[in-house]
């Protein structure tokens, strides 16, 4: 590594020199936890007037920082801030091929090796020499290293930008969930589509929908090999009601492929169990807003909406926090909590006429399909990067 980048560290600034209004933010190991460090952080600040110290420790320009102490040893982040200075025990790498170096140090091999080399009892640490001595096969030409680094960094930036859009869409969805359904002690929502003024009517959930019987999939047949049918199970059902693609389950073969065993496009399901004591998932509903179909496993049960009601509206209504919190209170059991159908059906909710239901349903289906497309784009970009890493490095 020392042949690819200049490896150094910061200064041991005295705490007595810190000032709440100091010009320079002091970057320490605690600031490094992801691929990028925010320029808006709360921490120690300091005033420095010595031009030599400013030139030596200022983090202007492009820098790759490496954690050298504590639980995040070996974690790296790109950082540039002319109003920040580097503290001691944080590694700083600069290079003409910095994007390439960043990709190398972002891989699991580097993190694992730094942790293997770390020493100490209460607080582990690594040295600048250990970072410098890290060996890896690289292209000899600087231009090739730069091109590889730029290509992979472009993918990283595209993934990050898509994730930002996804976060915004989820926040927008939560806003509408909070505003477009009546709050406690009110029979109309705070915001409505034009032309609707009627009060909403009280119904029991059981009069609007039913929960299909549980499907059985033998756990010993499930695999993480991407072949066959993607399985919706408790572990692939995320805490916020989306498919968690980081924990995939697949079933390679199925004799009976009837539709009742699958969650088809535009259908939604409820999770009726949870192993977590805080019950973050139980009672959550998940809408299939993709064009794929997913095999249903234990505890993930399809919901059938009765005639005269808009399915996506019922999904959005059950997706709201007020219904979810009530369902959590109905869970029973010792280790694994379960949610009985009758305790879902008895929930009292407010519902508008079919026309207003359809308007709200279309809004949420548009949001869900857009969210799903962004999730799929992120997964695709991550697969592209994974392929690049496997083929561009030895």
Image (cartoon, rainbow, N blue to C red):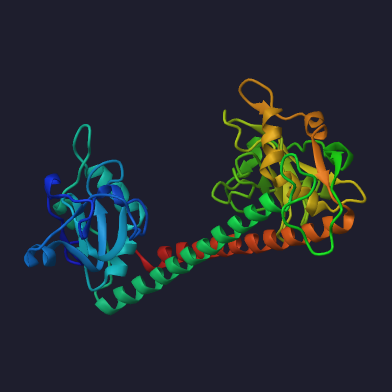
For the point 22% across and 42% down, which residue is it? 118
- Which x, y percent locates residue 63? 25, 65
On screen, residue 302 versus residue 121, left or right, reads right
Residue 258 at least partly seen:
no
Residue at image position (35%, 56%) is: 107
The residue that appears at 8% across and 67% down in the rendered structure is 51
Residue 203 against residue 190 in the figure, above or below: above
Q: Where is residue 348 in the image (x, y as percent from the top left)?
A: 81, 36
Q: Is residue 151 visible?
A: yes
State the quadrant of the N terminus: bottom left
318 sits left or right of 150 in the view? right
Of residues 364 and 177, the one nearer the viewer is 177
Question: Is 5 rendered above or below residue 183?
Answer: below
Q: Which of these two is toward me, 138 or 375?
A: 375
- The image position of residue 235, as x and y in percent, is 60, 40
The mark total stands at: 0
In the displayed structure image, the side of residue 79 where residue 188 appears, left or right: right
- The quadrant of the rendering that contains the C terminus is bottom left
Question: Which quarter of the figure has residue 66?
Answer: bottom left
């Amino acid at each position: 590594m020392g042949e690819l980048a200049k490896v150094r560290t910061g200064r041991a600034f005295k705490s007595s020199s810190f000032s709440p209004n100091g010009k320079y933010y002091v970057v320490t190991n605690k600031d490094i936890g992801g691929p990028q460090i925010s320029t808006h952080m709360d921490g120690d600040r300091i005033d420095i007037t010595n031009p030599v110290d400013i030139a030596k420790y200022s983090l202007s320009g492009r820098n790759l920082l490496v954690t050298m102490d504590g639980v995040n040893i070996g974690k790296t982040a790109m950082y540039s801030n002319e109003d920040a200075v580097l503290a001691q025990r944080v590694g700083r790498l600069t290079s003409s091929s910095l994007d390439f170096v960043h990709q190398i140090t972002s891989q699991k091999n580097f993190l694992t090796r730094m942790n293997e080399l770390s020493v100490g009892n209460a607080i582990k640490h690594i040295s600048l020499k250990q970072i410098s001595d890290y060996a890896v096969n690289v292209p000899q030409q600087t231009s090739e290293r730069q091109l590889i680094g730029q290509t992979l960094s472009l993918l990283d930036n595209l993934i990050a930008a898509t994730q930002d859009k996804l976060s915004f869409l989820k926040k927008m969805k939560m806003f509408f969930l909070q505003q477009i359904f009546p709050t406690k002690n009110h029979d109309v929502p705070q915001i409505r589509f034009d032309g609707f003024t009627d009060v909403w009517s009280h119904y029991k959930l059981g009069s609007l929908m039913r929960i299909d019987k549980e499907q059985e999939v033998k756990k010993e047949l499930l695999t993480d090999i991407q072949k066959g049918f993607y399985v919706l199970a408790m572990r692939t059902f995320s805490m916020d009601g989306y498919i968690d693609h980081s924990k995939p389950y697949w079933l390679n073969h199925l004799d009976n492929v009837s539709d009742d065993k699958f969650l088809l496009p535009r259908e939604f399901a409820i999770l009726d169990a949870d192993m977590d004591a805080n019950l973050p998932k139980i009672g959550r509903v998940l809408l299939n807003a993709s064009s794929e179909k997913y095999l249903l496993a234990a505890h993930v049960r399809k919901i059938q909406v009765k005639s005269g009601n808009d399915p996506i509206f019922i999904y959005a209504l059950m997706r709201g926090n007020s219904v979810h919190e009530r369902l959590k209170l109905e869970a029973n059991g010792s280790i694994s909590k379960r949610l009985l159908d009758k305790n879902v059906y008895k929930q009292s909710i407010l519902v508008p006429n079919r026309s207003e239901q359809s308007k709200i349903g279309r809004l949420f289906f548009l949001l869900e399909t857009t969210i799903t497309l962004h999730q799929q784009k992120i997964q695709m970009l991550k697969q592209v990067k994974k392929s690049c890493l496997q083929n561009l490095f030895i």
